[in-house]
């Protein structure tokens, strides 16, 4: 759907040049052409009126001076720095334009009619006057010579397999009479045919086609030869085949022309000589003759040079037409009329080899012209208008308009077409958004026809419907009408190569030939052209000319976008990408297609130029919302406004419509902000956007407009669909995070309520207010969708429908509602729920709709009907495993069912619920408590069981439970409630004291013995055993037994002093031994680390192979027979796991983690000494009290020494590096290769990797505890 638009044109007309031009070719230097005349060779430069160099061939006698000579071919040979010229007399000349030397490299006596060089200039083909072909090398060494007219077909002749005669074969739609039809004779060549052979090379230079008039038939034939001049094929007899010949550079077709009985066609031949397609020229038979056909270098444009035939006395008119194809239809895109003046009559035309869309034309009056074309898509300009999605396609004297707003009509069809008097060259749409459907059409006669929309009730005969009209179908498309026709008399300035405008800001941007950008405000009081400037004030100049330009805004700044024919995408004067094939802007969005076959969409509202450049250059993730894959070679045609359609055209010409996710979300957001719920819902449903977005976009607004939402949707099925898609998550944060910043999501007013429940409740209330009968099924869905589902309420509503027989025809029947419920809920679940309502009519109604066998449920229901109400409901609840409700109903059935009640409580452990159903004073409450207590005893929850027993008055069991739990105070209370005698109470106390001693609770055991057995001596011995010196002294003095001080107390404190000394000495020795060993281990590891570093660093600069199980190899690691990962230890059981934990760090010398084991043991020693400080303080006071100052001083000194030793050793053992590595481990989830390398170079890698980082933290000493006695210092 692209048109060809003239980018620029130019040329020159040298003054006072003798003779007339005959042919020309492109010069090696850019912008120069070589022209051959009757007298010699001229080089025309790019400057106006410039003949840069000239060679006169009449001086050397190669051409006659009377002007009768003719040059039949020119080729510029840059490697030989000369031009090759072939004359009709048969001379082949090499002309050096710089030195003006002419060399004759060969001559043909019979003369030459054509000289044609291969595209790679390795071969040259000469056609002689004797109808022979001579193939020569670039050095003019002949390869071979052949006659043009050959009798055989060639090497590519098809092989007949002998499948019967022509008469017996199938003839398709022509019928059997085709078998008897005589083959028509081939007509002679046209009367105007000059009879000269035509030569054309394939694009790769492997084959050459020659068209010549056959002397036998007088008709033209096309023969294909290879580079060795071996005939490959001969064309089938084609009646009326004409002289024009051009091989498509891509290689698949050879173009020529054919005059048929009723029309003039351009026909295409395959390499095997068979016809393959054609299109008809827009002229009557015998009206024009086709002089030449020329393909451009990329095979997209076919240029046709035509001249009028029916001319009386004046010179014939000359035309050049440019044709393109798409979707198997040929479009006439440009028609150049050169008039009938002799000086404007065409001599030759050529396509440029480097600039694909530049056409060179040479006229007889020495007027050289060039035209630069570029592709463009002509579509409506503006925003939010019904005409803005119109796309116009030029097709000869028609303009095909497709209104994508209404329907995507594939080309070559259209919505409607405009019929003009002449061929159309350009189309433009009105820049005012209010009149964006208005069009201006420029035709080949330089007339402008203006078509306007919406202001005329009369139908225009030049406008007719295309694919959307006819067959009684009334199209809802507004068609334009022809308003006025203007004629241009002022030529357009060739320096402006493109312009674009912005309807929003009324700005026009003009691109000049020097790539400078000018700005023009079309509504300014005085028209002023000024340079386009960026926000920094610098003027904008494109790096290279752009074929497509557009004005838009990026982050609020107005910028100009440009796209070159080399896929370079430019913003102002900055190239942001080099792989863009097409682009379009829509509102604040930019859409581009890339060479990697993707379509990307960017929101320009809050994006910087650098971010845009990064987004275009980086390979975005496949699931990125801004990117989607498209078919290879797709290009953007237009974006339909107020919609989400992006129309793409494929290379073949067919159209595809995609809905880009970013555009879809933006449009849905706009609709929701405007409360256009119906449009948003339909788009989301069609394009598979999650419907949760309707609520998540703005929860407050949605809830406030729930009734509006329901009225707009107005479809029970759609509302049900909305309910079924609801989920608790916020989709603006999960599935569509791009909307999170722009959505107006607010926290729920009731954060304890769930999102789905809130929506269901609000929507249900709204539907009940509007029409509860119409939205009955949706109301049921709202109940079912809640969490937990309100099945009973839904069933009750169905039951009410059955009871209330309404005359309303539109009302939903109970059967329909029930069938719908069964669609939403499992039938067994619904049956159980109906059974739980205790309504047997409802149960039968559900059961009838299910697949259940009546023999299964009817006897069960009949049995239930015969029961007493409470027992009936108990049976139902027990069947449904609703045990709490079952207990409630069973408790109302009387004492005769209490045993069944108690069994159910025991079976289901429903003790707490059961206790709530009876008063504490009843026997049933006591029986339940007894069972509950026994249950807790089995669970070894003795204290809780004792409390239950005691509360129910079961004191004997409470006493045993309190004893088992160790609550001796409560046990004595229970003994008192049971009326124990003094002896029995004493025996109980002695028994409990023995258990307390086993638990190292000497104080509590001593209290029992003293107060309840009155055996204070035994209590004293227990206190001394537990080292409770002060409590023992209290009892000794209370009962006046000072003799015990000598017999028991003094020996006990002396024994305690000795044991503490032994403990401290052993801890000190162990501490010193492990400390010294730790120092040795660390030295060994440091040496191993240094040696490893020296060995690896020169050869292994990238040390990135670190993992948790591969710490730096040390000397101890090398000698160890243990594996780092404990792979031999299985973790099949907790016993094995505990065993593995104990073996994790071994103190054995040479083990991998010996240093960690030493740290663990040293920490334990420090904590053990720290623990005994309090006990030693109390012991010191007793030793001093009884005069053992020497022993006390010795104990205090030993403890002080070991504490000082440990305090000074802690910084040496737990070094600052070790503590730092525990906070910031070298290896871990936050580590990088650089951080690991830095740690390695700093020798931190000798710090082992441990699974218990707390071992690397030093134990803390409590200095606040005052344990020393100053009198001992």
Image: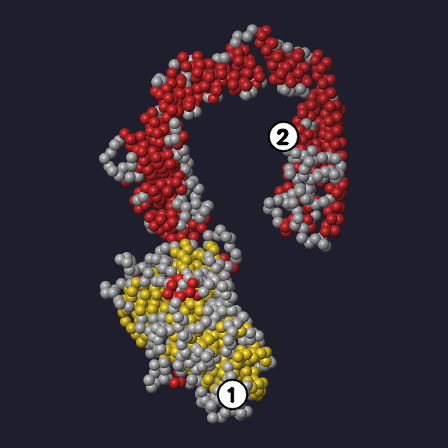
**Which residue sits at x=26%, y=31%?**
804
Q: Nearer the viewer, mark 1 or mark 2?
A: 1
x, y percent for residue 852: 39, 28
Q: Is residue 884 visible?
A: no
Residue beneath label 2, please? 1134
> SS for tag 2?
helix
- Asked whether 472 or 600 is in front, the reply is 472
In three-dimensional space, the C-alpha distance between marks 1 and 2, rounded to whole angstroms, equals 109 Å
Q: Residue at x 30, y 63 (%)?
A: 465
**Residue at 28% over, 39% down:** 774
Which residue is denoted by mark 1 in the rendering? 89
Residue appearing at x 72%, y 25% in the figure: 1060
- The quarter of the image holding the N terminus is bottom left
Circles 1 and 2, Cβ within 8 Å, touching? The answer is no
User: Foreground: 786 or 776?
Assistant: 776
Measured as percent of width and height from the top left, residue 10 is found at 43, 78
In this view, 151 is above or below 458: below
Q: Is residue 1238 above or below residue 884?
A: below
Q: How far across and how far down the image is residue 489, in percent?
A: 33, 78
- Callout 1: helix, strand or loop? loop
Percent position of residue 624, x then y: 48, 52
Tell me, for residue 503, which label it has, or none: none
């Amino acid at each position: 759907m692209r048109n060809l638009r003239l980018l620029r044109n130019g040329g020159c007309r040298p003054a006072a040049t003798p003779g007339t031009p005959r042919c020309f070719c492109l010069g090696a230097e850019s912008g120069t052409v070589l022209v051959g005349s009757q007298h010699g060779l001229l080089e025309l430069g790019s400057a106006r009126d410039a003949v840069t160099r000239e060679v006169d061939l009449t001086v050397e006698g190669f051409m006659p001076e009377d002007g009768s000579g003719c040059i039949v071919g020119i080729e510029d040979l840059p490697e030989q720095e000369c031009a090759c010229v072939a004359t009709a007399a048969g001379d082949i000349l090499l002309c050096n334009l710089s030195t003006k030397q002419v060399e004759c490299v060969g001559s043909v006596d019979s003369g030459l009619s054509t000289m044609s060089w291969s595209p790679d200039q390795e071969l040259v083909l000469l056609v002689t006057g004797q109808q022979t072909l001579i193939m020569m090398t670039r050095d003019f060494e002949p390869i071979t010579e052949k006659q043009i007219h050959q009798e055989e077909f060639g090497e590519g002749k098809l092989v007949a397999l002998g499948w019967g005669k022509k008469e017996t074969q199938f003839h398709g739609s022509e019928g059997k009479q085709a078998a008897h039809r005589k083959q028509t004779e081939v007509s002679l060549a046209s009367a105007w045919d000059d009879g000269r052979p035509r030569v054309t090379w394939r694009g790769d230079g492997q084959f050459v086609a020659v068209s010549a008039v056959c002397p036998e038939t007088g008709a033209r034939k096309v023969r294909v030869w290879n580079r060795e001049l071996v005939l490959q094929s001969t064309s089938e007899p084609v009646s009326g085949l004409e002289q024009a010949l051009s091989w498509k550079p891509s290689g698949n077709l050879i173009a020529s022309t054919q005059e048929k009985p009723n029309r003039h066609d351009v026909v295409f031949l395959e390499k095997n000589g068979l016809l393959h397609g054609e299109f008809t020229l827009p002229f009557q038979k015998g009206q024009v003759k086709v002089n030449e056909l020329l393909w451009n270098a990329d095979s997209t444009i076919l240029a046709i040079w035509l001249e009028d035939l029916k001319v009386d006395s004046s010179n014939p008119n000359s035309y050049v037409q440019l044709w393109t194809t798409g979707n198997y239809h040929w479009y006439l895109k440009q028609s150049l009329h050169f008039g009938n003046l002799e000086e404007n009559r065409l001599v030759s035309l050529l396509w440029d080899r480097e600039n694909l869309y530049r056409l060179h034309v040479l006229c007889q009056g020495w007027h050289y012209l060039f035209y630069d074309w570029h592709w463009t898509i002509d579509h409506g300009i503006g925003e939010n208008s019904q005409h803005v999605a119109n796309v116009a396609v030029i097709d000869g004297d028609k303009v095909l308009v497709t209104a994508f707003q209404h329907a995507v009509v594939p080309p070559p069809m259209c919505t409607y077409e405009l019929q003009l008097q002449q061929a159309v060259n350009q189309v433009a749409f009105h820049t005012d958004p209010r009149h964006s459907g208005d069009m201006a059409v420029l035709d080949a006669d330089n007339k402008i026809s203006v078509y306007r929309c919406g202001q005329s009730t009369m139908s225009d005969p030049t406008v007719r419907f295309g694919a959307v009209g006819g067959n009684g179908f009334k199209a809802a498309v507004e068609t334009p009408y022809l308003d006025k026709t203007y004629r241009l008399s002022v030529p357009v300035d060739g320096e402006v190569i493109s312009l674009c405008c912005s309807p929003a800001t009324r700005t026009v941007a003009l691109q000049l030939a020097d790539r400078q950008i000018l700005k023009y405000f079309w509504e300014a009081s005085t028209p002023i052209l000024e340079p386009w400037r960026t926000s920094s004030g610098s003027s904008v100049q494109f790096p290279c000319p752009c074929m497509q330009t557009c004005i838009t805004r990026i982050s609020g700044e107005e910028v100009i976008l440009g796209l070159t024919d080399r896929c370079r995408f430019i913003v102002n004067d900055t190239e942001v990408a080099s792989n863009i094939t097409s682009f379009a802007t829509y509102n604040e969005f930019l859409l581009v297609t890339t060479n990697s076959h993707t379509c990307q969409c960017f929101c320009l509202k809050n994006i910087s130029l650098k971010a845009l450049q990064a987004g275009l250059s980086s390979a975005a993730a496949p699931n990125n919302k801004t990117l989607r894959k498209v078919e290879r070679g797709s290009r953007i045609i237009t974006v339909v406004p107020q919609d989400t359609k992006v129309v793409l055209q494929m290379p073949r010409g067919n159209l595809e419509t995609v809905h880009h996710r970013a555009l879809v979300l933006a449009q849905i957001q706009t609709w929701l902000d405007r409360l256009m719920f119906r449009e948003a819902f339909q788009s989301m449903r069609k394009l598979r956007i999650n419907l949760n977005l309707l609520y998540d976009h703005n929860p407050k607004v949605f809830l406030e407009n729930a009734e509006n939402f329901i009225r707009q949707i107005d479809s029970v099925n759609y509302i049900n669909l909305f309910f079924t898609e609801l989920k608790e998550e916020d989709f603006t944060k999960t599935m569509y995070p791009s909307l999170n910043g722009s959505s107006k999501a607010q926290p729920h007013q009731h954060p304890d309520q769930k999102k789905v429940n809130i929506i269901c409740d609000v929507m249900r209330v709204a539907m009940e207010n509007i029409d509860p009968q119409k939205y009955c099924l949706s109301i049921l869905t709202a109940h079912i969708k809640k969490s937990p589902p309100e099945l009973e309420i839904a069933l009750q509503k169905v039951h009410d429908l059955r009871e209330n027989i309404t005359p309303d025809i539109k009302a939903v029947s109970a059967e329909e509602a029930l069938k719908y419920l069964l669609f939403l809920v499992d039938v067994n679940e619904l049956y159980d729920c109906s059974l739980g309502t205790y309504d047997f009519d409802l149960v039968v109604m559900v059961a009838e709709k299910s697949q259940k066998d009546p023999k299964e449920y009817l006897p069960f229901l009949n049995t239930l009907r015969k029961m007493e109400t409470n027992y009936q409901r108990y049976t139902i609840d027990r069947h449904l495993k609703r045990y709490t409700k079952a207990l409630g109903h069973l408790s109302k059935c009387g004492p005769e069912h209490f045993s069944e009640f108690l069994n159910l409580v025991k079976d289901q452990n429903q003790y707490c619920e059961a206790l709530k159903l009876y008063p504490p004073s009843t026997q049933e409450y006591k029986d339940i408590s007894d069972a509950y207590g026994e249950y807790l005893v089995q669970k070894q929850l003795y204290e809780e069981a004792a409390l239950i027993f005691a509360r129910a008055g079961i004191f004997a069991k409470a006493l045993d439970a309190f004893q088992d739990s160790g609550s001796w105070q409560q046990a004595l209370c229970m003994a008192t409630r049971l009326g124990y005698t003094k002896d029995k109470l004493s025996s109980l106390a002695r028994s409990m004291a023995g258990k307390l001693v086993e638990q190292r609770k000497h104080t509590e055991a001593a209290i029992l013995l003293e107060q309840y057995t009155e055996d204070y001596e035994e209590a004293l011995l227990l206190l001394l055993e537990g080292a409770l010196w002060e409590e023992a002294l209290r009892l000794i003095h209370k009962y006046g037994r000072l003799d015990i001080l000598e017999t028991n107390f003094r020996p006990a404190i002396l024994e305690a002093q000795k044991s503490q000394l032994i403990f401290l000495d052993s801890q000190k020795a162990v501490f010193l031994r492990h400390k010294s060993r730790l120092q040795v281990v660390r030295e060994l590891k440091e040496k191993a680390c240094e040696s490893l570093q020296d060995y690896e660093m020169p050869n292994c600069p990238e040390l990135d192979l670190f993992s948790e199980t591969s710490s730096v190899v040390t000397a101890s690691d090398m000698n160890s027979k243990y594996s780092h990962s404990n792979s031999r230890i299985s973790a099949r059981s907790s016993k094995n796991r505990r065993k593995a934990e104990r073996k994790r760090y071994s103190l054995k010398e040479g083990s991998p983690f010996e240093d960690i084991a030493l740290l663990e043991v040293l920490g334990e020693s420090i904590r053990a000494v720290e623990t005994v400080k309090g006990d030693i303080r109390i012991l010191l006071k007793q030793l001093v009290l009884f005069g053992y100052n020497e022993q006390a001083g010795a104990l205090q000194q030993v403890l002080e020494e070991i504490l000082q030793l440990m305090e000074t050793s802690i910084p040496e053992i737990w070094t600052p590096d070790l503590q730092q590595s525990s906070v910031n481990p070298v290896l871990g989830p936050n580590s990088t290769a650089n951080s690991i390398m830095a740690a390695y170079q700093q020798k931190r890698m000798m710090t082992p990797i441990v699974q218990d980082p707390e071992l690397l933290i030093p134990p803390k000493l409590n200095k606040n505890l005052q344990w020393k006695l100053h009198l001992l210092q």
